[in-house]
Image: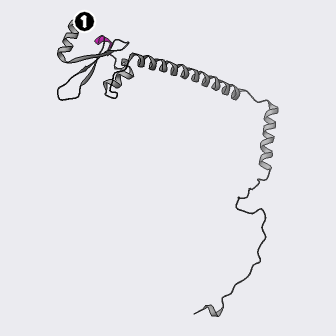
C-alpha cells in the first residue's frame, strides 16, 4: 500500500524484491554500520523460516552481494525439480535391483544343485594349494658349493 511504502521510505528501507511465496525483502540503511537486510512474511500466522528460498536466504546473510533475479530463481527451481526427478528414478532403480537380489536369494536350491555345490567345496578343500613364487625368486637355482672358512693366525694381532 501507499502508506506502507511511505513509512518504509521514512525508516530508510528500500524494497529489494518479493519472492513467489509473497515474502518481501528490504535493505535498511544504518548510519555508520553495514546495511541491514530483512524479510517480511505475508502474514505473521504463516511465519516459517524454511519458506525463504535459498537464493534469498544467501542474500539476507550477506553470502551474496546482489539479490537474486527472477530469471535466476526460475532457472534454479527448474534445476531443483530435475534433481528431484533424477533422485526418484534412482530410488526406483535401487528398489528394482533390491527386489531382484531378494528374489535370487529366496529361490531354494534343488537337492541336486546342493549336492553338486557340496562336491565342489570338498574337491576344492582336498586339492593341494599351489604356492606362487615371488617375482624376485628365480624359477630354478643351482646350489653353490659350501666352503668352510677357518681363521688364520696371521689375522690375529
In the image, 133 versus 5, the foreground residue is 5
User: Quadrant of residue 61 in the image?
Assistant: top left
Along the horizontal axis of the image, is 8 left or right of 70?
Answer: left
* Residue 75 x/y as whole percent: 45, 18
Q: What element carries label 1?
A: loop
Report crowding for label 1: few under 14, some 14 to 19, many 20 or more residues within 10 A (C-alpha): few
Q: Quadrant of the N terminus?
A: top left
* Residue 8 x/y as whole percent: 21, 14
Q: Does the magenta stretch include residue 32?
A: no
In the image, 72 versus 44, the foreground residue is 72
Along the horizontal axis of the image, is 46 left or right of 124?
Answer: left
Whether 94 is drawn above or below 43: the answer is below
Q: Does the magenta stretch include residue 44?
A: yes
Image: magenta residue range: 41-47
* Residue 153 x/y as whole percent: 64, 93
For disc 1, the marked residue is: 1
Along the horizontal axis of the image, is 50 left or right of 142?
Answer: left
Q: Which residue is drawn at 80% across and 49% down?
A: 126
In the image, 115 versus 154, the foreground residue is 154
Along the horizontal axis of the image, is 42 left or right of 132?
Answer: left
Amino acid at each position: 500500500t501507499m502508506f506502507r511504502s511511505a513509512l518504509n521510505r521514512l525508516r530508510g528501507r528500500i524494497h529489494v524484491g518479493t519472492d513467489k511465496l509473497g515474502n518481501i525483502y528490504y535493505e535498511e540503511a544504518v548510519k555508520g554500520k553495514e546495511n541491514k537486510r530483512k524479510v517480511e512474511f505475508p502474514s505473521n500466522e504463516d511465519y516459517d523460516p524454511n519458506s525463504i528460498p535459498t537464493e534469498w536466504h544467501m542474500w539476507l546473510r550477506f553470502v551474496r552481494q546482489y539479490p537474486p533475479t527472477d530469471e535466476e530463481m526460475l532457472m534454479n527451481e527448474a534445476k531443483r525439480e530435475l534433481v528431484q526427478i533424477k533422485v526418484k528414478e534412482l530410488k526406483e532403480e535401487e528398489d528394482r535391483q533390491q527386489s531382484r537380489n531378494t528374489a535370487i536369494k529366496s529361490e531354494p536350491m534343488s537337492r541336486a544343485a546342493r549336492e553338486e555345490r557340496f562336491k565342489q567345496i570338498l574337491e576344492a578343500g582336498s586339492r593341494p594349494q599351489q604356492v606362487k613364487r615371488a617375482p624376485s625368486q628365480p624359477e630354478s637355482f643351482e646350489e653353490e658349493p659350501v666352503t668352510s672358512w677357518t681363521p688364520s693366525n696371521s689375522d690375529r694381532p
